[in-house]
Image (cartoon, rainbow, N blue to C red):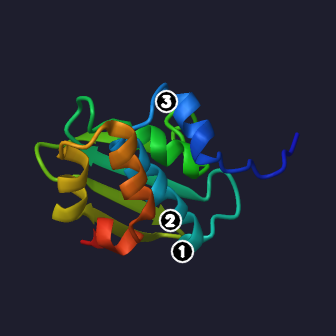
Amino acid sequence: MKFRRPKILRYQDAIRFHGHDGPFLALGYKLGKYINEKHKPKGIMDMHITVTVRPQKPYTCIIDGLQCSTIVTMGKGNMQLRKGRGNIYVVVEKAKKRYCYGITKKALSMCMGTDPLPTAARKILRTPAHELWHMC
């Protein structure tokens, strides 16, 4: 059976899926929307994403943001987590090409600042993706 392409969740739905609002969720969501616009996946298995991140909260919240704003998921096996120590990287593979995105110092500062989680998330969502992620 063939299904129509799934719809990307709205950010409010991503919050519901994740359980709460926060800057790392917003950071993953924002990158996922950018990835969709740039790489234009055609089907549910058209892209593979590898997230290299410290395997602990709040860093792993990026994963839920990515899953909600792309059609790439851990459950389908086209997203995987790679244990990182410090920097956060997201590698997108599509059509035998690889694209690497690394978190910027500005983004990390916004995430780890003293703002309440929803306030920090709103700042992330208002910031252009190129100021949050750089090509690596």
Relative side of 51 to 1, left or right: left
In three-dimensional space, the C-alpha distance between marks 3 and 1, rounded to whole angstroms, equals 25 Å
Point out residue 74 in the picture as x, y percentages from the top left corner: 49, 36
* Residue 124 occupies quadrant: bottom left
* Residue located beneath label 2 in the image: 35
Locate the C terminus by quadrant: bottom left
Front residue of 55 and 17: 17
Which residue in the structure is indicated by mark 3? 18
Return the residue nearer the eye: 87 or 19: 19
Q: Residue at x 53, y 35 (%)?
A: 15
- Labels 1 & 2 near each other (Cβ < 8 A): yes
| Element assignment for label 3 | helix
Mark 3 touches mark 2? (CB < 8 Å): no
49 lies left or right of 107: right
Name the N-terminal-most of marks 3 and 1: 3
Could you tell me which residue is drawn at 50 percent across and 65 percent down?
35
Can residue 113 be seen at all in this image of the molecule?
A: yes
Q: In the image, what residue type sits under mark 1?
A: Lys
